[in-house]
Amino acid sequence: MTVWMFNPYLHIMRNITAFTVLVIILCCGPPVMAQEQLNYTVSLKPLFGFVSGQAEEIVYPSSRFQAPLHSLLLWDMKPVVYYGFLLDFSQVEPMNTWGGFATFSLKYGIPGPSGIHDNSDWLSVENAGLTHFSRHDNHTRELFFLDFTSGFSFPLNCALFLRTYLQVSFIRMSFFGMDGYGIYARSSGNDTYHPISDDPRKETFEGKVISYTQEWFYAAPGVSLGYFYDDNFLIELSFMASPLILCSALDEHKTTNFQYRDQMWGGILFEPGIRLSLALGKWFDISWELSWRYINGTKGMTYQRRPIGTGTYVQGGAAGAGLSIINTGLGFRVRL
């Protein structure tokens, strides 16, 4: 059966284009406002850091099977170093009165080895036992973060302030698994298997075995609370949460020549964070940040075709995706 697929990637790119135009307007307009009101400024912050965590690829079974998952593929990022920049439009003196702010940031990961890739399957209709397992060296090929944030800042007293905002983000990450080994339970026929510990078939791999790409697009409201100590040192705690999530994924199994495309949505995102900043004068500051970006419960449909790159996609069941990454970064802000 040939199916029509909803493609959130095109929707993502249209939204990113609109947000980019908005960012350009915001970033080109502030110098004029700053001259007229002497209250806003633009600053540029080079960023350096690393992310550590995992991306999840999930296949859900039909009602015939006993296990809660059909397949679970884990892709390590342990760690991946990145560089980038943040462009900020905000008040010169945010503790004097309430006002708006906007930031636009880009981060690029440096490709390279990043841990392991595990692939687990539970394919028996008799029980929930593991039937297939393989492990490979994981390589991060791409890592790209785009974040646009806009909101309002409210001083609560001479040292404490509150920020409320909306963040729109796009994430693209791409991996491939190389070399490694596989352990496969012997089939008894009709989707039944011997225990994987009972004389399983073993296989070793050389070269590229599998590749996977995830693209996330989401919008999340957030709030942060900041405290200035001695006017120069800032501690800021932040938190975001949202169910407004889209995810598109592409999986290519080189050994079986199958290609899978997943279209998913929903779930929940949480992102708590902390930022420490030290002013080095009127025009400079250095900051350190730590945040945890967690997405779970995103589900949708998977489509498959064979061989890779040819033929028509057909529906292949239910799919899911998840993400859990810790970001640690340094930034050096310069007011323009």
Image (spheres, helix red, strand yellow):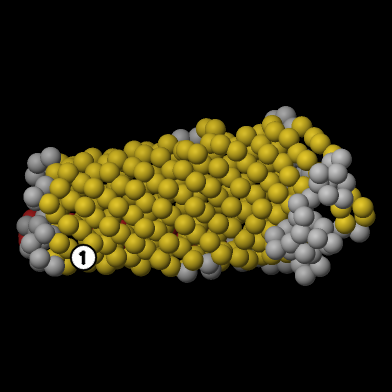
Q: Mark 1 points at which residue?
A: 162
**Kind of residue at disc 1:** Leu
In screen coordinates, is 105 left or right of 80?
A: left
Residue 96 location (% of width, % of height): 7, 63
The answer, for residue 208, to whether it is visible in the render is no
Residue 47 location (% of width, % of height): 31, 41
Residue 221 location (% of width, % of height): 35, 67
In screen coordinates, is 187 left or right of 172?
A: right
- Name the residue furthest right: 189
Residue 165 vs 133, above or below: the answer is below
Classify mark 1: residues with Cα within 10 Å, few (<14), some (14-19) or many (20+): some
Q: In which quarter of the image is the C terminus?
A: top left
Q: In which quarter of the image is the N terminus?
A: bottom right
Please report the residue visible at 77 percent of the width from the left and 55 percent of the height from the top.
129
Residue 77 location (% of width, % of height): 51, 41
Q: Can you tell which quarter of the image residue 331 is in?
A: top left
